[in-house]
Every structure is written in C-alpha cells, then in structure tokens.
Amino acid sequence: MTYRDVYVGELGEDDALDWHGTFATGNIPTRIGPFFPRAGDAWNLLHRRVDAGGSVGERVDWGAVAVRVTVDDLRAFVSDCYGSDVPAQVGEFIDTLDPARRYALVASEL
C-alpha cells in the first residue's frame, strides 16, 4: 500500500526547493507542522495543480513534489482541499507562520 503525506517545511538555501539530498535518497525538507489529515485528498490536489501548471513546483525526490507557498497560498490550498471543514490543527498551525516568509508545501509518498 502506498503511504502519502502532505506537510509544510522550510525552503532550502535562497528559497530553493533543494535540501542537499539526492533525488533517490531524500531531497525533501523536515516537516515543521502537522501532517495534513486525509492526506490522499491533499496529495492528489497538489499533484493536479503542479501537473496543470496552476502551482509552480517541481519533483524534488523520486516520491515527492514541492511548491513554494506563502501563508495566503496555504490558506487557499487548505480551503480548496477541505472547504469550510479545515482541520483545526492545520488551520492553527498556518496561523502561527510568518506571513512575510515563503515555505515548501510538500506531497510525498512511500
């Protein structure tokens, strides 16, 4: 069975989608907040957006894509994913983030 996760991490140096890992062994950021519940839904939504060009991101690892996002981008993503039923731990975490910074929204699978 495939295991999918969606989470927020720090961007690499100079806001790069690169964490000095290798494509085959783990070029993804450390998670800084909760995993998104119903990860399959969030994972599919993020992949569809990247594939359609609606979100600027890239495959950063053999099983992961990452997108640079602002806090407002994250709020819009979780609203699109969960509607008015945004999981409390995700909404509360997003509220703690610095709106002047960008982050990595990561969809990974094992």
Image: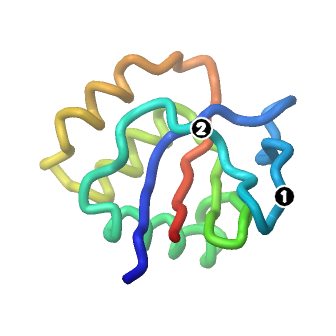
Q: What SS does tag 1 mark?
A: loop
- Label 2 amino acid? Thr
**Rendering coords of residue 53 (x, y %):** 66, 70
The picture places residue 30, in percent across and down from the top left corner, at 59, 38
Q: Quadrant of residue 101?
A: top right
Q: Is residue 75 left or right of residue 83?
A: right
| Between 16 and 26, the one nearer to me in the picture | 26
Marks 2 and 1: in contact by CB < 8 Å? no
Type of residue at label 1? Thr
Question: How many dots with numbers?
Answer: 2
Is residue 89 shown above or below 42?
A: above
Q: Badge 2, how many Cα within 10 Å: few under 14, some, many 20+?
A: some
User: Residue at position x 81%, y 64% from top?
Assistant: 23
Relative image position of residue 15 (x, y in whole percent):
79, 34
Q: Is residue 75 left or right of residue 110?
A: left
Decide: is 16 above or below 71.
below
Quarter the N terminus occupies = bottom left
Give the residue drawn at x 27%, y 25%.
Answer: 92
- Name the residue: 64% across, 55% down: 66
Label ID, residue 22:
1
Residue 91 in the image: state x and y as whole percent. 27, 33
The disc, 1 or 2, on the residue closer to the chain's N-terminal end is 1
Which residue is disc 2 drawn over? 30
Element marked by disc 2: loop
Q: Disc 1 to disc 2, how far (Cα)? A: 15 Å
